[in-house]
Amino acid sequence: MTALYNSAQQHFTNGDDVAGRADLRALIAADPHDTEALALHAIRSHYAGDTAAVGDALTRLGGLDPAMAAGTHDRFAPKTVGRARDNQRMSSSVLADVVGALRRAGCVFAEDEAALLLDAAAGDQHRLDALVGQRVSGTPLEYLLGWVEFRGMRVRVRPGVFVPRQRTAFLVEQAVIATTATRVCMVDLCCGCGALGLSATTELTARGCAVELVAADIDPVAVACARENLAALHAPVFGGDLFDALPGDLRGRVDLLLANTPYVPSARVAQLPPEAREYEPLVALDGGEDGLDVFRRVAAGAAQWLAPGGRVLVEIGAGQVETACAVLTAHGLASRVARSRDHYATVVIGTP
Ligand SMILES: C[S@@+](CC[C@H](N)C(=O)[O-])C[C@H]1O[C@@H](n2cnc3c(N)ncnc32)[C@H](O)[C@@H]1O
């Protein structure tokens, strides 16, 4: 079976998507639970514009969160790629070399990543060689670029900090679309690099809403990165365990509490793509036995910190909805669930 998988990769390297996908279909026919083949088939079908095949592969992935299984699929926005492709500095033969190197390393988004790495190297061949070498050895693309695009903004990321996923844009969208006030107090709890607070504040401010933003995270590396991202907004970033990190005067004043808590069940962490499990800190991924340990603690504290009419918004896995709603109810919060098929995202929203 490994031979067939390698053959598929070789076909993709040669640009023969039809043959590559045929190999993957043969693998899936032999083992309908081959998650590696299913995930790659979903991605390559996405590139081929075969939405029916994408849906079929993701459905067969079943219990796995499809976005999680697709791995890097969720990690950078097509808009970013488009801009890099337009880069006039790019030479097609250098691009082809880089694409080939990335493909041989098993990089499923080789074309897109090559364009971004060429852009980052800015014509410096030594720098390009170093970037490609690191990428081939597994370093996540976003750490090499130093940024990720999130809701149309470039957000700085540092090695060791969780890379914001594209699906989390849906949480921000839910926070922003339902906000009609002209002044809000917002907390980005478990902020990582601060992408949620940064994008939500930028979007609300552009609409004339005055935002008081405070962010917090337990990981000092994340706190330092969020401080860089939020400096222009003059938003303070605190280090510490959930609500313990926040200034007491926020108690009862928070209109929007955004929290992308870690929600991967401990036993599933080993199934995450290597870029997550080998490079991102466990504290950012592991949500305990059912994935909801940190969520439970956020839910337990939310009512004390929310203002009347305030909302707590938390991203969860599709299979965690029932438990998450029950937890919010147990802590005196009304719950609502928002789902996005486009982003494979699920957000639970609690109000006092
Ligand atoms: C899934 S990451 C999300 C980061 C960021 N919000 C994003 O979406 O890019 C979860 C974050 O929660 C932080 N975290 C985990 N446990 C925490 C705790 N007890 N208190 C505060 N932050 C915590 C991790 O350090 C990590 O940055």
Image: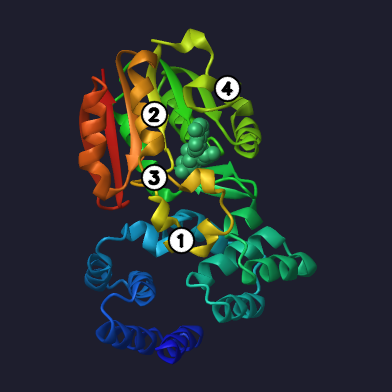
Q: CA distance from mark 4 to mark 3?
A: 26 Å
Residue 297's mark? 2
- Mark sitting earlier along the chain (1/3): 3
Which amino acid, by three-letter code, is at mark 2?
A: Arg
Mark 3 Cβ inside 8 Å of ligand 1: yes
Please name which of the two marks, 4 or 1, marks the residue nearer to the observer. 1
* Near-viewer residue (85 or 334): 334
* Near-viewer residue (54 or 39): 39
Residue 263's mark? 3
Q: Residue 12: x and y, percent? A: 46, 83
Residue at point 52%, 43% (across, down): 283
- Mark sitting earlier along the chain (4/3): 4
Q: Which residue is mark 4?
A: 235
Q: Residues within 10 Å of mark 3 (few under 14, many from 20)?
A: many
Q: Residues within 10 Å of mark 4 (few under 14, many from 20)?
A: some
Q: CA distance from mark 4 to mark 2?
A: 24 Å
Q: Is residue 228 left or right of residue 180?
A: right
Could you tell me which secondary element the residue under label 2 belongs to? helix
Q: Residue 103: x and y, percent? A: 54, 78
Q: Is residue 50 above or below residue 253?
A: below
Q: Is residue 56 above or below residue 285?
A: below
Residue 270's mark? 1
Q: Residue 2: x and y, percent? A: 44, 87
- Mark sitting earlier along the chain (4/2): 4
